[in-house]
Amino acid sequence: MSTSVLRSCYRCGYFAETAEAVCPRCERGLHTATATRIRGALLAVLGAILTFFMVYLVSWALAAFRATDPTGARFTGDEQQKLVILGLFGLLIAFGLMSFAIGMYQVVVGRRSKGFVRAIVTIAGLIGLGGAYVIWSF
Ligand SMILES: [Zn+2]
């Protein structure tokens, strides 16, 4: 028998101290606040790494666009392709920051925010569209 701890349902948002393993409202599996916090911490770390990596890539891309990159990398695409690439990098930075924010929120409150998850799914969709355009246009 499991002990009574804070548990939440990622589907309907049910959040209470209970020993149940299944959500009483929608019958999905419940997640303990501790498990949600650990996942949140991992997400925050990954989000921070992605953000730093993308900021580095953006500065590298801007140098390549100006053809002043010390490694000699040079961008030969047109202006529209530059904008799409920078937009895509911007979205990836937003994705990284959002992952960090969602992770920190989970660490603090011990449950998941549906609004946050919806926002990051939207950003991921835009990244997919931008990526498809880049692959298609080069
Ligand atoms: Zn539920």
Image: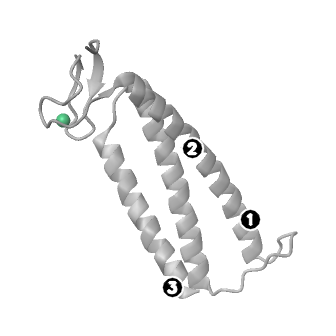
Indicate the secondary structure of the residue bearing disc 3.
helix
Q: Work out how far the residue at label 1 is from the one at label 3, CA to CA, in angstroms.
A: 23 Å
- The residue drawn where x is 61% and y is 84% is 79
Residue 104 x/y as whole percent: 47, 33
Q: Are marks 2 and 3 in contact (CB under 8 Å)?
A: no
Q: Are marks 2 and 1 in contact (CB under 8 Å)?
A: no
Q: Is residue 124 above or below residue 5?
A: below
- The residue drawn where x is 83% and y is 73% is 68
- Is 75 situated left or right of 126 in this image? right
- Is 113 situated left or right of 130 in this image? left
Residue 5 x/y as whole percent: 30, 15
Whether the residue carrying mark 1 lies under 8 Å from ligand 1 is answered with no
Q: Mark 2 — residue?
A: 46
Nearer the observer: mark 1 or 3; the answer is 3
Q: Mark 3 — residue?
A: 136
Indicate the secondary structure of the residue bearing disc 2.
helix
Whether the residue carrying mark 3 lies under 8 Å from ligand 1 is answered with no
- The residue drawn where x is 60% and y is 50% is 51
